[in-house]
Image (cartoon, helix red, strand yellow):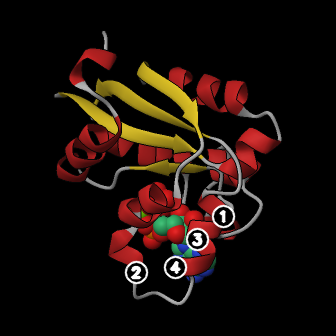
Amino acid sequence: MTLERTFSIIKPDATRRNLTGQINARLESAGLRIVAQKRKYLSEKEAKAFYAVHQERPFFDDLVAFMTSGPVVLQVLEGTNAVLVNREVMGATNPADAAKGTIRQEFAESIEANSVHGSDSPENAAIEISYFFAGCEITE
Ligand code: ATP
Ligand code: MG
């Protein structure tokens, strides 16, 4: 049992449909504590840097355009095994494959506009958190 932090984004398709509260309720019900949160537009530079791992993929330009198309909510989530727990609550990347009761199964519009991001490892969580949050912006 390790208390862990992960990084989460509520994506523009979800903020546009006013789903922030419903998504936060899912996260909290799963035992995740929102210890930092801010709503902002990602700049093109931030979106490209954030998804740099996908820069050779055919969907990269579309993904950057989508992620900058509206405000996002950036979050730090804390809890036991937070990285894994969040990935479970989110569901599979493609909502068609996402398990029943997951955020993506319920809310995602498409494989691209899939409502939420979650870090895929504790190492990437630490990198993503420090990219968007100063230590003094994160509380208990
Ligand atoms: P995320 O990193 O956003 O949490 P993920 O880890 O489930 O999602 P990745 O493979 O890292 O999935 O893809 C990053 C994001 O790129 C996806 O969440 C989705 O928005 C977009 N994406 C992934 N695959 C495709 C695709 N085939 N077509 C269009 N967009 C895609
Ligand atoms: Mg990913």
Give, as a three-letter code, the residue at label 2.
Gln
Give, as a three-letter code, the residue at label 1.
Phe
State the quadrant of the N terminus: top left
Residue 41 at what x, y percent from top left?
Answer: 60, 44
Ranked by sequence position, the earlier of labels 2 and 4 is 2
Give, as a three-letter code, the residue at label 3.
Leu
> Which residue does the numbered mark 1 point to in the structure image?
66
Q: Residue at x 32, y 31 (%)?
A: 133
Q: CA distance from mark 3 to mark 2?
A: 10 Å
- Above or below residue 36? Residue 39 is below
Residue 106 shows in this picture: no
Ranked by sequence position, the earlier of labels 4 and 1 is 4
Q: Residue at x 74, y 51 (%)?
A: 13
Whether label 1 lies within 8 Å of ligand 1 gets the answer: yes
Residues at discs 3 and 1 in contact (Cβ within 8 Å): yes
- Determine the secondary structure under disc 4: helix
Q: Residue at x 53, y 90 (%)?
A: 58
Residue 4 at what x, y percent from top left?
Answer: 23, 30
Q: CA distance from mark 3 to mark 4?
A: 5 Å
- Residues 134 and 27: in front is 134
Residue 55 is marked as 2
> Which residue does the numbered mark 4 point to in the structure image?
60
The answer to whether 93 appears left or right of 132 in the picture is: right
- Determine the secondary structure under disc 1: helix
- Residues 47 and 98: in front is 47
Ranked by sequence position, the earlier of labels 3 and 2 is 2
Residue 111 at what x, y percent from top left?
Answer: 65, 70
Q: CA distance from mark 4 to mark 1?
A: 10 Å
Give, as a three-letter code, the residue at label 4.
Phe
Whether label 3 lies within 8 Å of ligand 1 gets the answer: yes
